[in-house]
Amino acid sequence: MAVVRGLRHFLKSGGIIAYPTESCFGLGCDPKNRIAIQRLLKLKGRPQHKGLILIASNLRQLTPYMAPVSKTQHQQLQASWPGPHTWLVPATKNCPPWLTGDHNTIAVRVTAHRPTARLCHDAGMALVSTSANYSGCKPARTARECCRLFGTQVKIICGRIGRQRKPSAIQDLETGQVIRP
């Protein structure tokens, strides 16, 4: 996957990207850029109250959004990462509400998909990761599908998706409840 030259600047200035993840293409942007988030949600037709997932190449990229967790909880995170497991963890008081929606948790994942991890590394930040689709529709699995859906409204990062057939599992770190198997 060729990384976009000037990726960090593009994201910081409100750009939206479509990129391959473990199971499908995702739409992403700088999680701290409220205007980019609003554009992304409008593009998808997704309500803000649902919240969004952040994907990262390492735990350090996620810690600005996560409240401290217990040693046992930290071990749970480490045991499942990197990998296709999204955790709902308590959000920091400073976590932007456009990421958490109506929740006091933030959905986070450290990816094992090398191209996506490299993308986060090169961007120097965690990225928003929501499926590249219109809300409620089947997610795009190729760059060509993303181009058909979103045209020039997003910058498409070409590459192959991973081998996962289903989206990542989502589990609440505090209760253990599996939200999405």
Image (cartoon, rainbow, N blue to C red):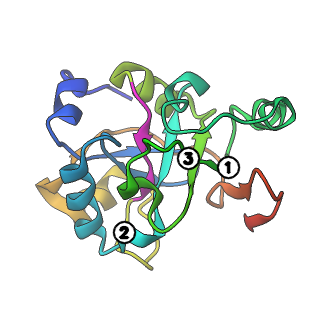
Residue at screen point 42% across, 71% down: 49
Please tell me which of labels 2 and 3 falls first in the chain.
2
The residue singled out by tag 2 in the image is: 48
Q: Residues within 10 Å of mark 1 (few under 14, many from 20)?
A: many
The secondary element bearing badge 2 is classed as: helix
Q: Residues within 10 Å of mark 2 (few under 14, many from 20)?
A: some
Whole-percent x, y for residue 1 in the image: 39, 29
- Looking at the rendering, the stretch of residues picked out in magenta corresponds to 125-131
Q: Residue furthest front?
A: 93
Q: Amino acid at mark 3?
A: Ala
Q: Is residue 100 left or right of residue 58?
A: left
The residue singled out by tag 1 in the image is: 87
In depth, the one of 106 and 113 nearer the eye is 106
Please tell me which of labels 1 and 2 falls first in the chain.
2
> Residue 148 is drawn in which quadrant?
bottom left
The secondary element bearing badge 1 is classed as: strand
Give the number of the disc on residue 103: none
Q: Are marks 2 and 3 in contact (CB under 8 Å)?
A: no
Q: Amino acid at mark 1?
A: Trp
Q: Amino acid at mark 2?
A: Gln
